[in-house]
Amino acid sequence: MKDLSLYIHIPFCISKCYYCDFSSFTNINHKIDEYINSLIIELDLYKDKIKDYSIKTIFIGGGTPSCINPRYINRILEFIYRNFNTSDLVEVTIEANPGTLDKEKVQIYMESGINRVSMGMQTLDDTLLKSIGRIHSTKDFYKSYEILRNGNMKNINVDLIFGLPNQSIDQVISSLKKVVELGVEHVSYYGLILEENTKFYKLYNEGKIFLPDENIERMMYHKATEYLTNHGYKHYEISNYALPTYECKHNLVYWEVRPYLGVGLSSHSNMRGKRFFNTSDINIYIEKLNMNKLPVEGEEIIDKDTEMEEFCILGIRKIEGLSKIEFKNRFEVEIEKIYGDIIKKHIDNGLILNDHNIRLTKKGLDLSNLVEVDFLK
Ligand SMILES: C[S@@+](CC[C@H](N)C(=O)[O-])C[C@H]1O[C@@H](n2cnc3c(N)ncnc32)[C@H](O)[C@@H]1O
Ligand code: SF4
């Protein structure tokens, strides 16, 4: 049996944060029930297609999966357990917004086999939280965290954002200090991306918000890395840090270009030599599934060259870098034979190192996009 990871998208949020352009909606709660029914139909349609796969990880993301009734989450997972091969399942993550958890919800998550919760903490500064449109306060975060621990949740991730308008380095480190004190197992630490179609994008273009300058933003990154690694966290991907053994197994599948299936609105999949993605229109999604048709909107065949590109672009994001042996085993050719010029160019300009693996230097972590684009043919 081949391994497979499963992503499940829940596109509902209580309100839209000012920086976020993820596929999520705030005013269509009346569609939740219909959406979950469609999701179950979609899973059912994949039953035969993935019968020779064993599901290793499940990630329920969004949107905010924790804002819908936990019985829906239980229904989805029970369907998966009944219909797919999950005997080797090791990690089941759900994303949660602080302030949306209570004791009963966490209990249902635990009973449903969820063993990892990823919380969007963003910062532990109340003024900043308000200024980015979050629905919760730091107090809500602590309360949700306590509920999770009391409910016996042993693997918690927090998402933090740096480079926010009016954010200082001290504020960033102060949030991380509290994270370390709590003993959170995993930290995702994202630099703010100014996305089109967000409130921040508009405010920025109107000159109403200002972002920290690039040097400060980079300092926020390197100081945080230093702080977390000094406190026992392994920096294992550009934006991710984990206490020993707590690396996110699901996300490693993406970075290592191993097979995954995405179900739900806008989800992406990569399996059987194909990349495909679902519609981002919730009405079309529901309509198609009501007719027992998959809501796939586009697909691309992945030939060997494309697979090599992906392997390098995504793999270089891991701090341990690209394994030359793995490249050779997978593609039956030395990596230097295909990418020798690119490797030499970026060794010369100080962005990568080439020993047993090919990996980013400290300078390369700041300029990883320059390396990534060069792997594109
Ligand atoms: C789906 S949300 C996490 C779960 C939940 N919806 C929440 O916000 O608490 C995914 C995460 O992506 C990050 N994110 C979203 N938009 C971002 C942006 N424009 N720049 C940087 N990070 C972003 C945030 O840290 C957020 O927690
Ligand atoms: S960050 Fe999370 S809660 Fe905020 S809009 Fe995006 S998905 Fe929703």
Image (cartoon, grey):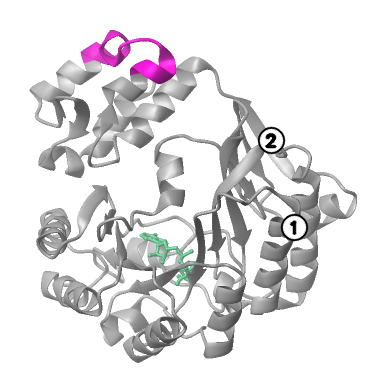
Tell me the residue at 29%/34% (across/down): 316
Horizontal arrangement in the rendering, residue 165 relative to residue 284 (left or right): left
Mark 1 C-beta to ligand 1 under 8 Å: no
Q: Which residue is mark 2?
A: 52
Q: Is residue 96 magenta?
A: no
Kindly identify the amino acid type of the residue bearing the numbered disc 2. Answer: Asp
Tell me the residue at 29%/70% (across/down): 209
Kindly identify the amino acid type of the residue bearing the numbered disc 1. Answer: Arg
- Main secondary structure along the magenta-highlighted residues: helix
Q: Which residues are magenta?
A: 328-341
Q: Which residue is mark 1?
A: 82
Horizontal arrangement in the rendering, residue 49 relative to residue 255 (left or right): right
| Quadrant containing the N terminus in the rendered view | top right
Name the element at disc 1: helix
Q: CA distance from mark 1 to mark 2?
A: 15 Å
Q: Against 133, is 325 above or below?
A: above
Residue most extreme to the right = 291
Find residue 124 and report its horizontal and vertical position in percent. Answer: 27, 80
**Contact flag, marks 1 and 2 (Cβ < 8 Å):** no
Tell me the residue at 69%/58% (across/down): 81
Horizontal arrangement in the rendering, residue 223 relative to residue 183 (left or right): left
Q: Quadrant of residue 372?
A: top left
Q: Quadrant of residue 40?
A: bottom right
Name the element at disc 2: loop
Q: Against 189, is 98 above or below?
A: below
Q: Residues within 10 Å of mark 2 (few under 14, many from 20)?
A: some
Q: Quadrant of residue 323?
A: top left
